């Protein structure tokens, strides 16, 4: 029985993964009159008088909606909202486990951007924050932007920023080992979807000056005639005029490879064509762009992947629980770039002495959430 | 400190009433790979292949959305969705306590009927059923009708049908004591909002042939020129041509009074003008149409109210947990009239030997949910 079959049986046995917990006793008439009628009118009147009281007298401030339309689920693609539900429930139990956040999965019927945005706005009064999940690019960019603009609670698309935070923290620690910096390093990002675009933007705001980004058709360069508006906008952030062509063309002499694409696209030869002692983040799941041991054989100095059976596992669970915990604790109206960058250095600081086999904390390192939450809350506005 | 102040302090202390519970362990990498990536893909693929599998591998089948727009909250009126949240959280913990149903409060920003209906449709894939709550009449009728027609999961507006079920069960038992029946009893319903209309319709389907219904302007009769379309439709179900005028005019010689209106509208004199040994349901909260002891002094034989400090407490918690439990257990696509009528006789049967001071079970009678759930599931289609 492989892990997929084992997990299917596990899901059937448990009938899913989430349930409601009551925080209050309901054992007699007095309990009932406090939690419900007539007493509850006291709490409702308080909010009617002062809407801010909702954060004090209800659970709203600790509930996060995990919202998807099922358009880009894991590596499975557009399997639709119903089939996305097990993944969203999984995300909810991770929120609970790692950050004591109460999360609820909202799988929307629609894959229309306007309807998505309007529906989330309509139900936002039930939540303290919105975690967008597994939404296909480029729709995810517009959905996040619009919801951020229109809601006064934090909104974050985890596939973008959660990933970018962990990659940036890992790279920060890798540079501590190599002695280099964002400013003077040649980077290539393979994959220009949600994660690739967010990583690119975050690396630029961390000071990176020489980044190439490639999609499945090759380097995103000015001579490409097939670029979407989103990808065209990336040209200003990269070095489009100097290098164009395939991934093989682009990878030459690069010092860092960050793959958020598909399995097995990075060959040993490509790694050997990179600068000496390159840093490889091969994050495609479950099959990385290159297997970590193969990358090492080809000369990579530091290798990270999404896999738990190799060192340096890049997993969003290292970032989003702390980011949302911090935003909720501060009752922040949004998750700003400053808060994300604060999360990057906080996460990096959780590895006091980075080494090639340890640039990122273990996913079960329970100190991480607290460190990130504090750092995020501190700079929240 | 009165009950409202005590409840406000209780809400502040607990920071609301609901939290998420994880049904699965997450203690090591293997747990993580079963509940989330990569294993969860096995559950998602199963649903992608067969959408019905969502009921087997997710928690959806035990989650009920408690949805309101805050337009008619308790006796507080249109206090809006934010202020409605404590009441909805209360409903959720009651669902959990009485029926082991996982319920989540959705407080919609909108009070527009179309937007309400569309939003609930969009998020319905996250839920096994929809409990509508505290929505003003006549909007509640259209919202419920449209959602019932457009969704393939159970939808019930509890303020209508939950109340109607408990009243009908109480009356069933009252008639066992008096030896009368729905068919030959003169009934007056005071209040033509959500509950009043639903009670009227249910009593008619139980065989009642002589019902008057009154709103705040008096008996709903054919000579009224101020009737809304909904109220006009009630004329066909009542005896409009014989009696018109005020509540005082209508109450004369009636054998049953059912108040779902406001406090203190039924006087001793009105009770004395009723037929001998009348049955009084004075359900306005927290102040009944007439206090139960006053009604008794005026000659009432059986009195029920919403109050826990008098016998025969009519409380919806006696009906909706069992109705939804039964509908979810049967995975019913809707809650039909047959299922509601089955709930009525099941609830009535929970009092084996009715007496004037005991026509309805105690709200903490734990056998009720199971009895109703079985009866509802049995006739579900």
Image (cartoon, coloured by chain):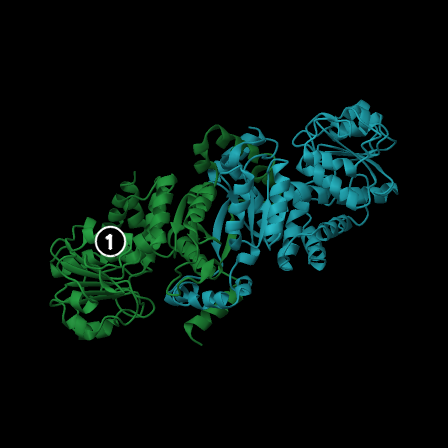
Chain colours: A green, B cyan
In which quadrant will I find the C terminus of chain A? top left
Q: Residue at x 54, y 35 (%)?
A: B7
Q: Depth check: give the residue in front, B324 or A265.
A: A265
Q: Secondary structure at mark 1?
A: helix
Q: Depth check: give the residue in front, B104 or B230.
A: B230
Question: Which residue is disc 1 drawn over?
Answer: A232
> Quick check: B286 above or below B346?
above
Q: Residue at x 34, y 44 (%)?
A: A327
In which quadrant will I find the N terminus of chain A? bottom left
Which x, y percent locates residue A254? Answer: 14, 64
Number of numbered discs on residues: 1
> Quick check: A235 above or below A287?
above
Which x, y percent locates residue B43? Answer: 47, 66
- Residue A257 in view: yes
Q: Residues within 10 Å of mark 1 (few under 14, many from 20)?
A: some
Q: Is residue B133 left or right of residue A188?
A: right
Which x, y percent locates residue A286? Answer: 34, 69
Which x, y percent locates residue A120? Answer: 44, 46
Q: Quadrant of residue A27?
A: top right
Q: Is residue A345 left or right of residue A377?
A: left
- Residue B359 in view: no
Q: Residue at x 39, y 54 (%)?
A: A133
Residue found at the far bottom of this picture: A1
Q: Depth check: give the residue in front, B284 or B202.
A: B202
Q: Quadrant of residue B279?
A: top right
* Host chain of mark 1: A
Q: Depth check: give the residue in front, A25 or B380.
A: B380
């Amino acid at each position: 029985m492989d892990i997929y079959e084992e997990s299917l049986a596990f899901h059937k046995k448990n009938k899913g993964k989430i349930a409601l917990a009551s925080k209050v006793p309901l054992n007699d008439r007095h309990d009932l009159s406090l939690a419900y009628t007539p007493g509850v009118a006291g709490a409702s009147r308080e909010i009617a008088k002062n809407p801010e009281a909702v954060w004090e007298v209800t659970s709203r401030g600790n509930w996060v909606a995990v919202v998807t339309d099922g358009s880009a689920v894991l590596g499975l693609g557009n399997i639709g909202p119903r089939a996305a539900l097990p993944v969203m429930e999984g995300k909810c139990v991770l929120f609970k486990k790692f950050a004591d956040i109460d999360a609820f999965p909202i799988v929307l019927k629609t894959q229309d951007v306007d309807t998505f945005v309007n529906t989330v706005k309509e139900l936002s009064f039930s939540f303290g924050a919105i975690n967008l999940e597994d939404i296909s690019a480029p729709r995810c960019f517009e959905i996040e932007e619009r919801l951020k603009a229109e809601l006064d609670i934090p909104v974050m698309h985890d596939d973008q920023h959660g990933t970018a935070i962990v990659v940036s923290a890992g790279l920060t620690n890798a540079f501590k080992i190599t002695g280099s910096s964002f400013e003077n390093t040649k980077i290539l990002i393979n994959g220009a979807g949600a994660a690739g675009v967010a990583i690119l933007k975050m690396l630029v705001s961390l000071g990176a000056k020489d980044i190439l980004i490639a999609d499945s058709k090759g380097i995103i360069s000015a001579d490409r005639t097939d670029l979407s508006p989103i990808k065209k906008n990336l040209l200003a952030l990269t070095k489009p005029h100097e290098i164009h062509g395939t991934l093989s063309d682009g990878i030459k002499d690069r010092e860092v490879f960050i793959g958020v694409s598909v399995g097995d696209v990075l060959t040993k030869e490509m790694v050997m064509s990179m600068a000496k002692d390159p840093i490889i983040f091969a994050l495609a799941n479950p099959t990385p762009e290159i297997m970590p041991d193969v990358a090492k054989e080809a000369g990579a100095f530091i290798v990270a992947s999404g896999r738990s059976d190799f060192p340096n596992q890049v997993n969003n669970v290292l970032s989003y629980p702390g980011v949302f915990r911090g935003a909720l604790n501060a009752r922040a109206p949004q998750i700003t770039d400053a808060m994300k960058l604060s999360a990057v250095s906080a996460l990096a600081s959780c590895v006091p002495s980075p080494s090639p086999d340890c640039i990122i904390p273990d996913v079960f390192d329970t100190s991480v959430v607290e460190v990130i939450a504090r750092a995020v809350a501190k700079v929240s506005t």
